[in-house]
Image (spheres, grey):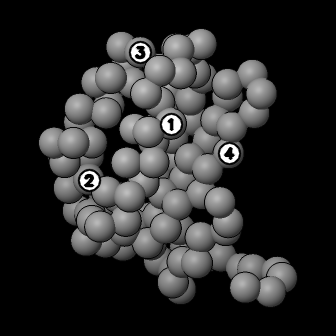
Amino acid sequence: MSIANTPNPPYYAVIFSSARTENNKGYSQMSEKMISLARQQPGFLGVESARDENGFGITVSYWESLEAIQNWKENSAHQLAQNLGKKEWYQRYKVRICKVERDYFFGSE
């Protein structure tokens, strides 16, 4: 995964910090499916994700508006994944929604 190519601010970031369980059954496939589905949603701008060897991960998705974020939260396939995550894949997680007021970039794109 690479650094998301976001537009000039303002835009929104949804930060999903999570601690995984040891159950990996179906997780990778669902994760890939959710990223693919999110990319199809109106207002989606990009995503970045990382996970360490202990199961702690952070995924940041970027959105044009709070309405786009709410629509993604209410997506039926996404809700199914959320419920499976609570039952099977996550010990705990926290979601933070932030407005990006400023950004800058170093390096070649």
Of helix, strand and loop, which one carries label 1?
helix
Does 53 sit above or below residue 66?
above
Kindly identify the amino acid type of the residue bearing the numbered disc 3: Glu
Judge the density around disc 3: few (<14), some (14-19), many (≥20) Cα neighbours within 10 Å: some
From the image, state whether disc 1 or disc 3 is nearer to you: 1
Q: Observer-nearest residue: 85 or 103?
A: 85
Mark 1 vs 3, N-terminal side: 1
Of helix, strand and loop, which one carries label 3?
helix
- Residue 59 is left or right of residue 27, and the answer is right
- Residue 22 is left or right of residue 80, and the answer is right
Residue 75 is tagged as none
The image shows residue 97 at horizontal and vertical percentages of 44, 50
User: How far apart are the two marked residues, 3 and 4, measured between alpha carbons?
Assistant: 20 Å
User: How far apart are the two marked residues, 2 and 3, measured between alpha carbons?
Assistant: 21 Å
Mark 2 vs 1, N-terminal side: 1
From the image, state whether disc 2 or disc 3 is nearer to you: 3
Of helix, strand and loop, which one carries label 2?
helix
User: How far apart are the two marked residues, 1 and 4, measured between alpha carbons?
Assistant: 13 Å
**Label 2 sits on residue:** 72
Does 83 sit above or below residue 95?
above
Kindly identify the amino acid type of the residue bearing the numbered disc 2: Trp
User: How far apart are the two marked residues, 2 and 4, measured between alpha carbons?
Assistant: 21 Å
- Name which residue lies at 67% across and 68% down: 3
- Name which residue lies at 71% across and 79% down: 104
Q: Hey, which quadrant is residue 44 in on the image? A: bottom left
Kindly identify the amino acid type of the residue bearing the numbered disc 4: Ala
**Label 4 sits on residue:** 50
| The C terminus sits in image quarter | bottom right
The image shows residue 2 at horizontal and vertical percentages of 67, 66
